[in-house]
Image (spheres, rainbow, N blue to C red):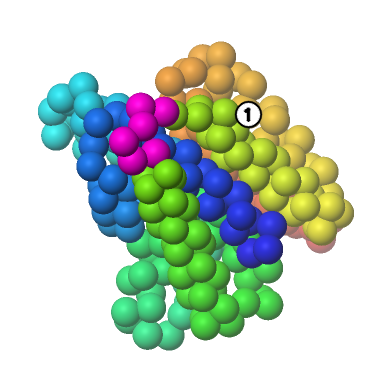
Amino acid sequence: MLGVGPGMVLLGVSFGLLVVSSGLPWWWAPVISGVVYAGSLEFLLIALVGAGTPLAAIALTTVLVNGRHVFYGLSFPLHHVRSHAGRAYAIFALIDEAYALVATRPGAMSGARILWTQVLLHSCWVGGGVLGAAAGAGLAWHAPALEFVFTALFVVLALDAARAEGEVTGPALAMTVAVPAGLVVPGQMLLAAMALFVVLLLVRRQLPRRRRGADA
């Protein structure tokens, strides 16, 4: 959290500035950050609302942008959270950063630590949005460069996970599927890449079993 939290705050500040500069009241920043809580979708939502996009189109866009969370649920250690209310919140607060922090060390994270991690991430995001909206209130100013914090944050998390696990096959497979997905379906690159990545991981998992069966 010491490394991820400040990044969440800075990105939240950028979102708060975007809300105010788009002509919305400042209090929309904490409302959207607290209720929607979907990172990149929130930035997109401001543009869609400002353009008067129909609700059905917004709903479809939400499914396409956040469809990757279906894959997150396959390996997120939700079974460590005992209470029904805690599980409901853990599902709601399953963002990219929470997955990166928790799923890489599922055996070492108790249910309480998982929930506190998600609560702190949520607080950093909402707090950053409030700060950004307050700072930009009355000013038609937006600093898009702050949005790069989102990309830089995941670069750091990916490098740290690869170093901790000591293997390069996973990152290599990810790059292998990311490039063609970006070329073939650039509008839905992330969803397509993650679907292909899951398929390759399943194939990689089955290969040792087939080899053991052949040896036997």
Looking at numbered disc 1 in the image, what kind of residue is underneath it? Val
Residue beneath disc 1: 177
User: x%, y% of residue 136?
Assistant: 39, 39
Which of the pair 154/216 is nearer the observer? 154
169 vs 22, left or right, is: right
Identify whether 151 is placed above or below 2.
above
The percent coordinates of residue 173 (x first, y second) are 71, 36
Residue at the location (45% across, 64% down)? 123
Q: Is residue 118 left or right of residue 202?
A: left
Question: Across the whole image, how many numbered discs are drawn on residues?
Answer: 1
139 in the magenta segment: yes
Residue at point 60%, 49% (across, down)? 7
The verdict on residue 178 being magenta is no
Q: Is residue 65 visible?
A: no
Comparing 134 with 55, the one in front is 134
Residue found at the very far front of the displayed protein: 138
For residue 24, say whether it is visible: yes
The segment highlighted magenta reads 136-141
Residue occupying image coordinates x 82% and y 58%? 164
